Image (cartoon, helix red, strand yellow):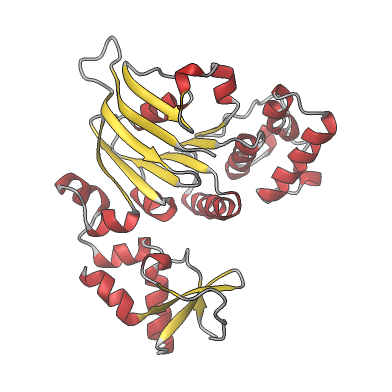
Amino acid sequence: MGTISFENVSLQFPSASQAALQGVSFEIQVGQLVVILGPSGCGKTTLLKMVNRLYEPTSGRIYLDGTDIRLLKVTKLRQQIGYVIQQSGLFPHMTVAQNIAVVPKLLGWSRIKYQSRVDELLTLVELPPEIYRNRYPAQLSGGQQQRVGVARALAGDPKVILMDEPFGAIDAITRQTLQDEILRLQRQLKKTILFVSHDVEEALRLADKIMILQQGQIVQFDTPFNILTRPANAFVHELVGAGDVLRQLGLLRVEAAMRNVPEGSSYGSEYAIAPQDNLRQALSLLLRTGVEYLHVVDGEKLVGVLTLEQICHLTRE
């Protein structure tokens, strides 16, 4: 489980002249990765922190799996929610293993169980346990620290994961690698993830849906495809650069334009692309090879077909 609902939620800080959030309502389904996007000061982090009750609403209600979160003990609520922040937030005096084991220990797991979980998660984020479990955060690169931060957030097998600009302080190459890791993990684990970002390309690359905030209000909550092709207003159009077709192709996933095929169809083409690859890569492959279509392959499974005509149709839209 992991459905999150906001019902007419507002938050007014006592010293502020304007509400941080105003009448916000939405629902996030189980297993969705939702990126909260917008300029500085629009209410992104405020909204995120209301999910685990770091901030309480002035009015309105917030639900987790249909239960008003105010009816839950704060400690009980937070044990169901993983939290990843910028620069990892690891405890410097604890080893990697000790950092990851914090929540399992609070949940009363046995030593054997939490040690096994530590090794499982280090393997999952591609940090070999035998090398990294006994290192301290200062002995890791920024990207490695963020991987440990993600592992720690997953440790108690939470319903929901909150990520507050987790890659904001990372260099561009490492940032893209970590984005790939999040997409890989999400395909495996299907957690409900709220991910705050100020980076449009990151949002378009990662999100199942994007929530765009402006001055504490939602101006559009939609798929990356719809936000790029049907921006709700001039602010959204400007924010995401909706008029630049080549940029759109570089940001939209192949799965946005592919035609699905019946389950069990065979995979025989020598030219294939993954559903998470971008349409600019697909266009380049189609033009370079001259083939009529590409097979879209997820692992070993054929999931779709993509033609030049489908890409052209999308750009015309």
* Vertical relation: 61 (above or below) 167: above
- At 80% across and 40% down in the image, what residue appears? 116
Q: Position of residue 296 (x, y in %)?
A: 49, 74
At horizontal 57% and vertical 82% (from top left) the residue drawn is: 266
Q: In which quadrant will I find the C terminus?
A: bottom left
Occupied quadrant, residue 313: bottom left
Instruction: Please report the residue visible at 21 percent of the width from the left and 72 percent of the height from the top.
Output: 316
Observer-nearest residue: 102 or 91? 102
Horizontal and vertical percent position of residue 241? 24, 55
Tell me if residue 192 can be seen.
Answer: yes
Q: Residue at the far top: name it.
A: 14
Count the labels in the image: 0
Q: Position of residue 282 (x, y in %)?
A: 41, 75
| Residue at the limit of the structure toward the right, as seen here | 112
Image-based side of 130 in relation to 70, left or right = right
Q: For this rendering, which residue is in front, 231 or 38?
A: 231
Q: Is 238 on the left or on the right of 149, as rendered?
A: left
User: Residue at left 75%, top 39%?
Assistant: 117
Q: Is residue 135 left or right of residue 287?
A: right
> Seen from this angle, which residue lies furthest front?
66
Using the rendered image of the protein, determine whether residue 53 is visible from the camera's viewpoint. no
Is residue 259 shown above or below 9? below
Residue that lies at the very extreme toward the left in this rendered image? 234
Res 256 → quadrant:
bottom left
Question: Looking at the rendering, which quadrant does residue 106 occupy?
Answer: top right
* The N terminus lies in quadrant: top right
Q: Is residue 39 positioned above or below 59 on the image?
A: below
